[in-house]
Amino acid sequence: MSLAEATAVLPTLRIDDYDPVADVAALNRLADAAAQFSPLVGVEATDKHPWVGRHLAAPQAILADVTRLTHFFGGPAGMTQAVAAWVDSIGYRANVAIAGSVGAAWAMANYYQRNRWNACPIPTASRAVPVEACPPDSLPITLPASLPVAALRLDNATHQRLLRLGIRTVAALQKLPRDSLATRLGSGLLQRLDSLSGVKQESIECFHAGPQFYVETILEVPTDRRETIEELIRRLAEQLCERLRHHGQGALRVLCRLRIVDAPLRTLQLGTFRPTAEPPHLVRLLLGQFEQQIRNRLTIDAMSLQASLVAELRWQQTDLFDQAQVNVRDKTAELIDVLASRLGSDAVLVAESVANPLPELAYDVKPLTGTQLVKQPTPAATSTTALPTTAAEDQSFEGVSAAPSHRDPLRRPLRFFHVPVQLDVLAIYPNGPPIRFRWSGRFETVTHHWGPERIESGWWSGPTQRRDYYRVQTDNGAWLWLYRDLRTRKWYIQGEF
């Protein structure tokens, strides 16, 4: 419903501007208060893009691990009723569900009583999903047959692709072969499906998980002196790092919360390239965030630091002559952290390979800081085909194939054009290799060529792309990567070796 429609229905409607910081802060306070039901409570982890049924990629749900705790409330049904009553008592409304996995509980709370294919609306009173609909103690997890695929926490693009294929329920999706799902719809879909069915347990980023890497100071008298605030940051950073080192952990993501007098809570967040427990380094990053994000004079009465994402600190004895290399690695990590703090984590990125046959879509970029980067195996190039070449075409490099090979240094260009440049090419016959073309205002004559290498995209990714790639050497010594679009018959250049 639009704002105009809402005001027409209810003229006395109160309208407030959306404050994402205050919204997340309120959800965090609610999660803190929910610790009365479980010591392991946290908010949901969101993706970069909003899920189906949501307009913002912001957390809206609270997760809790209630394993071996439901008997204190008379069983799972009694616990859901107790949580629903508590939510009502503090002025909120919610859907409450218990299941055997994070994915199943989220799906039941959001989509058990759905409206068509959209998430069910928040009721006028908190509602507890019947435990019989998804028994938490049953393995494998049994789900309602009518549960829509939107309950998998999918982005809109993946959801629409499934609907176009006629796949509307989770039950229908589970009947398909798993081998083809990752190739056609991405590995993320399998992870969501495994989380829903309980095959793979999904962790909860708990507020009170294990040792609390959280320090706080409350001032007797509020202060607006910048020197005092900076000194508080230094002291809290030393206390936090001491706790981290005591448990052999290092911070990958740190939250600094400032409780401001007569103003919403302000949260500063920073990420690090590798786990750290060094107070000077954290202080330098926090002060940089403070100077960048808070330019006005603020009066605070409390401050806290929390390591929301940690990893094990690995201490390793260096070799006798390896100290210089270690120092270079340390300085590089510090440089990455400082750049991410000053420019933002979205400006300091790392490229990762993606299993996509099209070269311009075969990689993805992710932030270098604040995440645990997992090295993925390089996907096999099963979507490319080397068409046979004649002896005359391959006379310069005996045994060199057009298909990618790890032993071949010319498998892909060093300089890649994300947007291919169209060329005017002369070929002897319609499907033949390029002989002469015009590029950058001059004519180039091909002296040697290798190929073609046929690359095709899958039908599930939209209109099929079919290309024949050639590696060519020109008369002026240039090594280029050209391809012919088999659908339009046009030529393009996509890289230089």
Image: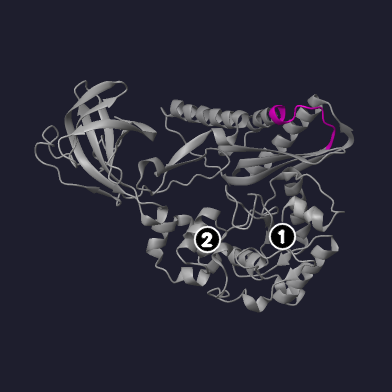
Expressed as whole percent of the image width and height from the top left, the position of residue 383 reads 30, 51
Q: Quadrant of the N terminus?
A: bottom right
Q: Residue at x 27, y 35 (%)?
A: 482
Expressed as whole percent of the image width and height from the top left, the position of residue 91 reads 84, 60
Magenta region:
290-301
Give the amino acid type for the residue marked by disc 1 in the picture: Pro
Q: Which mark, residue 192?
A: 2
How did the renderer colour the structure? one colour
Give the quadrant of residue 397. Answer: top left
Crowding at dot 1, Cα within 10 Å, few <14 / some 14-19 / many 20+, comes out as some
Give the quadrant of residue 231. Answer: top right
Residue 159 located left or right of residue 436: right
Q: Residue at x 42, y 32 (%)?
A: 319
Residue 211 or 449: which is nearer the viewer?
449
Give the quadrant of residue 5. Answer: bottom right
Q: CA distance from mark 1 to mark 2?
A: 25 Å
Q: From this viewpoint, is residue 32 visible?
A: no
Crowding at dot 2, Cα within 10 Å, few <14 / some 14-19 / many 20+, comes out as some
Asked if the magenta segment contains residue 313, the reply would be no
Give the amino acid type for the residue marked by disc 2 in the picture: Arg
Residue 486 located left or right of residue 127: left
Expressed as whole percent of the image width and height from the top left, the position of residue 351 reads 45, 39
Q: Residue furthest left?
A: 391
Pointer 1: what residue? 39
Disc 1, SS: loop
Q: Is residue 133 above or below residue 276?
A: below
Q: Are marks 1 and 2 in contact (CB under 8 Å)?
A: no
Asked if the magenta segment contains residue 291, the reply would be yes
